[in-house]
Amino acid sequence: MKKILVVDDEPDVANLMKLFLNSLGYDTDIFPSCEDSLAAVMEEKYWAVFCDYLMPKTTGDKLFNIIRSADEELAKRFVIITGAVLDEKLDVFLKGEDVKVINKPFKLDEIRNILMEFEKI
């Protein structure tokens, strides 16, 4: 079973994603922050990551950079989730990286479609 990491400081969003991903047959871990997820990223073999961009202590691009240096294959299946409408740092990051983005509020079909794309990688 493929394992997915969800990092989001909003418990409702994280739990909804976990329920949905589990219903699709994925094993899902959720963490409320990038810092909390770091040990799991280094110990577990994740297949994909869905990470909120703007969280209280850091931004999702920081976790992406850590993952990219540790596991280039996982970095190909990294998704930023964001509610930020205008964020210059996010725009600069996205222009420099091939990362999928889901805007909040999102539809579960968006997640399903991205996963179908990832299955082809």
Image (spheres, rainbow, N blue to C red):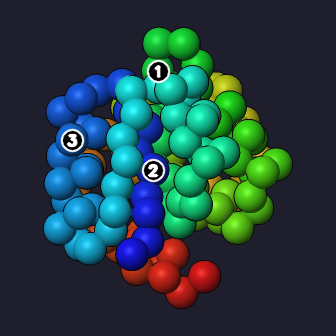
Secondary structure at numbered mark 2 = strand
Please name whichever residue, 107 or 26, is drawn nearer the observer in this view of the structure: 26
User: Which mark, by number, is residue 55?
Assistant: 1
Where is residue 69? Give x, y as percent: 82, 48
User: Which mark, by number, is residue 15?
Assistant: 3
Which residue is outermost to the front?
43
Q: Which amino acid does label 2 sit on?
A: Leu
Side of 16 relative to 80 (left or right): left
Residue placed under numbered mark 2 in the picture: 5
Q: Which residue is drawn at 50% across and 26% down?
A: 36
Q: 16 above or below 46? A: above
Please name whichever residue, 42 or 77, is drawn nearer the observer in this view of the structure: 42
Q: Mark 1 or mark 3: which comes first in sequence?
A: 3
Task: Find out whether the residues at labels 1 and 3 contact each other: C-beta distance under 8 Å.
Answer: no
Query: How much space separates mark 3 and mark 2, taking CA atoms?
Result: 12 Å
Where is residue 13? Give x, y as percent: 24, 38
Q: What residue type is labelled 1?
A: Met
